[in-house]
Amino acid sequence: MINKAVVSDIPDDELKGKKVFVRVDFNVPIKDGRISEDYRIRRTVPTIDYLVEKGAKVILGSHLGRPKGRDLPGLSLRPIAFRLTELLGRDVKFSPKIIGKDVHYEVDNLNNGGVMLLENLRFHIEERNNDEEFAKELASLADIYVNDAFGTSHRAHASTYGMALHFEKKVAGFVVNKEIMFMSSMLMNPLKPYVVIVGGAKIKDKIGAMKNLMEKADKVLLGGGIAYTFLKAKDVPIGNSICEDEMVPWAKEALEKYGEKIFLPVDHVVAESFENRKTSIVVDNEIPDDYHGFDIGPKTMTKYSSLIKGNGTIFWNGPMGLFEDSDFSSGTTQIARSMALATWRGATTVIGGGDTISAMRNAEVLDLEITHISTGGGASLEFLGGSDLPGITVLNDKN
Ligand code: ADP
Ligand code: MG
């Protein structure tokens, strides 16, 4: 069981007046200086508030996009400092410099409870290279290190890993702690019955997670692109639907081992091609040669919804179809709404994956209708696959 020290484990008198570097995930969509979606920023408010209240000097660092070591004005974090000022109800300083004497000067001038945001860490190529000197420079800004960026914890970059090595006190923030709690519970001790729903494009992206989840789950509902590889393994005609031929043998094995708990689509919304959807129709099990399966059909939807009940745990990753197009979004929307109803009825519901979360929002399911929304993406899948995440492993254990 992963048991990492949390920011609230640090005694109050060890926080007061101390410089605390918090690695946050402010990788949010920004267009023309406007932030269209600030969920990741809002999530870090509790950690920042906590540190402010304890009189720490808070230095926030994040990446944004992929500037590849260049200073790209469109990827500046400056607009985020303004948004954060609104969210926190207090002034947030912005430092265009990340290392060097200017930023040290700014940090030294922070009051107890003051908050400062550094410019995009990836404006320095050394960030992604986990450059030793750069990591040391970053570390020299603070006395305590906090990781509150779960989504980048699977990367050993300077700010997620290298700099942490220089601290005696390195702990998880509240976002990371909550992710660790929920993700470990998905693997170790989910409330039963445990239903896992997996969809999306590729098995290969999630094979580690799928192996572990299939073993733990009582029921596994498959949909989306990955279902076709399983159907092919069962010799069900799938037409031109996406399929990972090289994964068919693994799917066969999984079906032999877990066959009685695996559920596969029994009908489909199909079209001749993405361009030609006038012909989009529903077919039962067998998909005609020239057709693609783009969504689960109504019988499958009804069956899956009936299995998403109001007790135990339900974990969902991966859309049930090509949900980006409204012709093929019904299956995914239905699953999202069933998840919300299950939460209201008392189940613990967890949703992970970038596309799955946007599908959930498309379906107008509210964040508060899901017990936990994991914004970890790749990091969540690696965690569920049992890999060590460097940004988590490096933190102090709880004592
Ligand atoms: P997440 O980001 O939530 O982990 P994935 O990235 O694994 O999800 O999968 C999402 C993608 O899978 C979407 O772009 C969606 O269009 C695609 N997809 C789902 N079902 C199908 C299908 N039947 N055919 C083609 N693409 C599909
Ligand atoms: Mg995705």
Image (tube, grey):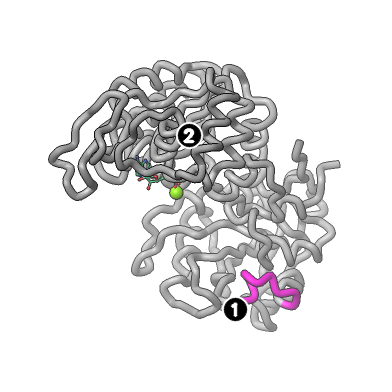
Q: Residue at x 62, y 69 (%)?
A: 128
Residue 359 shown left or right of residue 158 in the figure: left
Q: Which residues are magenta?
A: 124-133
Q: In which quarter of the view is residue 291 placed? A: top left
Secondary structure of the residue carrying numbered label 1: loop
The numbered dot on residue 97 is: 1
Packing grade of label 1 (10 A; few <14, some 14-19, many >=20) is some
Q: Nearer the viewer, residue 150 or 19?
A: 150
Against 368, residue 85 (above or below) is: below
Ligand 1 shows up in the quarter that is top left
Label 2's element? strand
Which residue, as the protein is rendered here, is positioned at the far bottom?
A: 101
Q: Position of residue 105 (x, y in %)?
A: 68, 79
What residue is rendered at 56% in x and 57% in y?
25
Q: Residue at x 28, y 40 (%)?
A: 292
Location of mark 2 (residue): 198
What numbered label is drawn on residue 308? none
Tell me the mark number nearer the camera, choosing from 1 and 2.
2
What is the C-alpha distance between the residues marked 1 and 2?
Answer: 43 Å
Magenta span: chief secondary structure: helix
Q: Can I make out residue 94 in this image?
A: no
Q: Amino acid at mark 2?
A: Val
Where residue 27 appears, as percent x and y from the top left, is 50, 59
Does ligand 2 reach within 8 Å of label 1's beta carbon?
Answer: no
Image quarter of the C terminus:
top right
Confirm whether residue 107 shows in the render.
yes
